Image (cartoon, rainbow, N blue to C red):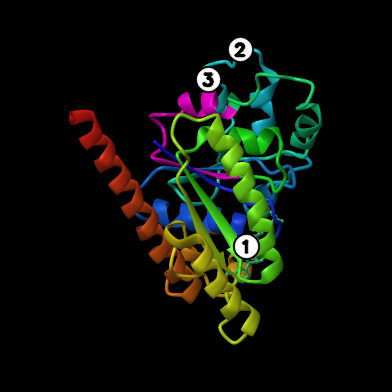
Amino acid sequence: MHVWAVANQKGGVGKTTSVVTLGGLLADRGHQVLLLDLDPHGSLTSYFKYDPDNVEKSAYELFQHRQMPEDLPASLLLDTGHDRLKIMAASTALATLERQASGKGGQGLVVSKALAMLWNRFDYVLIDSPPVLGLLMINALAACQQLIVPVQTEFLAIKGLERMMRTLRMVNKARKHDLPYAVVPTLYDRRAQASVQSLRLLRNTYGDSIWHGMVPVDTKFREASVAGMPASMLDPNSRGVHAYSVLLKFLLDRQNERHRLDAEGAVL
Ligand SMILES: Nc1ncnc2c1ncn2[C@@H]1O[C@H](COP(=O)(O)OP(=O)(O)OP(=O)(O)O)[C@@H](O)[C@H]1O
Ligand SMILES: [Mg+2]
């Protein structure tokens, strides 16, 4: 099982859209995919027409047990309308966990434990992380093997990205190996000077860690969210879907390369 988290402390940069679109493309390719909503706002949950205020089964349940029952994570899976794509919803109650976080230790690995119980069930898990640094983001970053950081191509968003990078450095101090990450330029409008200039700045600043493509502004994403399906189901030939396919190939190539290096390291 491969676990990817999508996170950025800046809101509205395309995190949820990236989770749905990449997840849809992986499912289209025959993989079993889980989309995990850890954002108390529940945009990913709403995307698939579940109500975060009333949803019965949600990731909140994972945090309610001192000893997590082995069958709990599987019992929380919901359908999306795509055969190979499941969702674990966010309920608004998740927000109360963020507030409790400072007082309660030892809950940083709850999501890692839950995913371990689903290890044979899914090929890929994509986590939609909230835009605030708290217990839920820490859980997402602890559970994943790769981090995807969407960033809107405009200057304020680039400032926000610096905050996410500080968070990542802090998390890396607690990990054995640094978490691989990829910065993903989104909402790119080639007619806007701000987009063109900030893309250049991003590429200069993030060198090897940035995907050298970009996701264009494409109204198909909004249509797909209204329809409650991944954009590739609605219009596989749209420009936006094409961009995410290229991004997916980049992420898979990098993942394969890391596995190859790990295998070599094990032999030597
Ligand atoms: N490439 C794109 N082209 C056009 N619209 C987009 C694109 N990416 C995202 N959007 C739209 O922009 C809005 C914000 O995107 P999204 O919800 O994915 O961001 P987010 O980072 O998850 O936001 P939040 O921090 O609020 O969770 C949504 O209405 C979405 O449909
Ligand atoms: Mg979101």
Q: Quadrant of the N terminus?
A: top left
Number of marks = 3
Residue 263 location (% of width, % of height): 23, 35
Q: Is residue 115 a member of the stretch shown in magenta?
A: yes
- Looking at this view, name the residue that lies furthest to the top: 67
Sequence-wise, the earlier of marks 3 and 1 is 3
Q: Using the image as rendered, state which of residue 19 and residue 161 is in the foreground.
A: 161
Whether residue 9 is in magenta: the answer is no
Q: Quadrant of ligand 1?
A: bottom right
Q: Which mark is residue 225?
A: 1
Image depth: mark 1 or mark 2 in front: 2
Q: Which mark is residue 67?
A: 2
Tell me, for residue 71, which label it has, or none.
Answer: 3
Callout 1–callout 2 Cβ contact below 8 Å:
no
Question: Which one is in front, 219 or 104?
Answer: 104
Query: What's the residue type where badge 2 is placed?
Result: Gln
Q: Is residue 164 visible to us here?
A: yes
Residue 57 visible somewhere in the drawing: no
